[in-house]
Image (cartoon, rainbow, N blue to C red):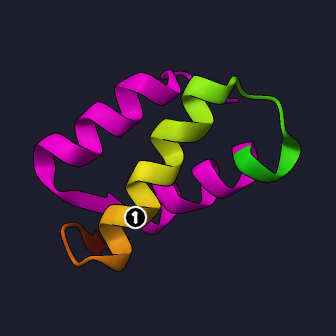
Amino acid sequence: MITTSVEEMVAKIFATRRITRHDQSILMTLLTQGRISSQEETLINQIYEALSQGRLRVVE
């Protein structure tokens, strides 16, 4: 069960400029289940864009 909202998770990731493998797993699960709003999907897509551009670092 996810205790923080997508918005809170995304805000934390961008504030620290780091994403954990666990965070990635949660976000991918949310995307594949399709149980999120279009706004949440946009936020998650921003995370993956930032990763591909090297603006975020993956940490363990």
Residue 11 lies, in percent from the top left, at 27, 32
Say whether residue 57 is magenta: no
Residue 60 in view of the camera: no
Q: What residue is drawn where x is 22% and y is 78%?
A: 54
Q: Secondary structure at mark 1?
A: helix
Left or right, 37 with respect to 25, comes to: right
Asked if 17 appears above or below 56 in the picture, the reply is above
Amino acid at circle 1: Glu
Left or right, 50 with respect to 23, comes to: left
Say whether residue 16 is magenta: yes
Q: Nearer the viewer, residue 23 or 38?
A: 38
- Report the predominant secondary structure element of the magenta stretch: helix
Q: What residue is drawn where x is 82% and y is 53%?
A: 32
Residue 45 lies, in percent from the top left, at 51, 52
Q: Which residue is mark 1?
A: 49
Q: Quadrant of the N terminus?
A: top right
Q: What residue is drawn where x is 51% and y is 46%?
A: 44
